[in-house]
Amino acid sequence: MKSDKKKVIILLFVAAFIAVAPLFALKGAEFGGSDDAGSVMISKIEGKEYQPWFTPVLETFIDGELPGEVESLLFCVQTGIGVGIIAYNLGRLRERKRLLAAAEAANDAD
């Protein structure tokens, strides 16, 4: 049990290092979103300013841009839904494996 605890602690430190290392390694770098990078590349390829071909539904509904807090909230909700789906499916697979093992044990006992 102690070796498992040690592995978990080491892996947590490695994960923290991986998350923090770019902040120190790339001190002057600007971190931007993929939307910005995509529009810059399209502008370079086409040689003219990129114009979106549709307006987002929520921005049309509220007659303006979404505040940054609302965008962050929507990303968090999306992440929560995705994690919930993944956790549900992992739980289902684990329970299925447990039930199959119990059924095999019952068949072997007969």
Image (cartoon, helix red, strand yellow):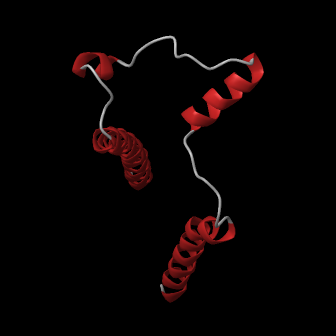
Residue beneath the point at 64% across and 67% down: 27
4 shown above or below 36? below
User: Is 27 or 12 nearer to us in this picture?
Assistant: 27
Give the answer, above or below, for where 109 lies relative to 78: below
- Above or below — where is 20 with respect to 82? below
Q: Quadrant of residue 54?
A: top left
Q: Residue at x 53, y 85 (%)?
A: 6
Q: Position of residue 77 (x, y in %)?
A: 31, 41
Q: Residue furthest left?
A: 62
Rendered location of residue 37, percent (x, y): 63, 36
- Percent coordinates x, y for residue 57 in the rendering: 33, 17
Q: Nearer the viewer, residue 83 or 22?
A: 22
Q: Residue at x 63, y 65 (%)?
A: 22
Query: Where is residue 49 drawn, in percent x and y?
Result: 63, 20
Judged from this view, the residue extending furthest toward the top is 53
**Residue 51 relative to residue 95: left or right:** right
Task: Find the residue positioned furthest to the bottom.
Answer: 2
Displayed quadrant of residue 68: top left
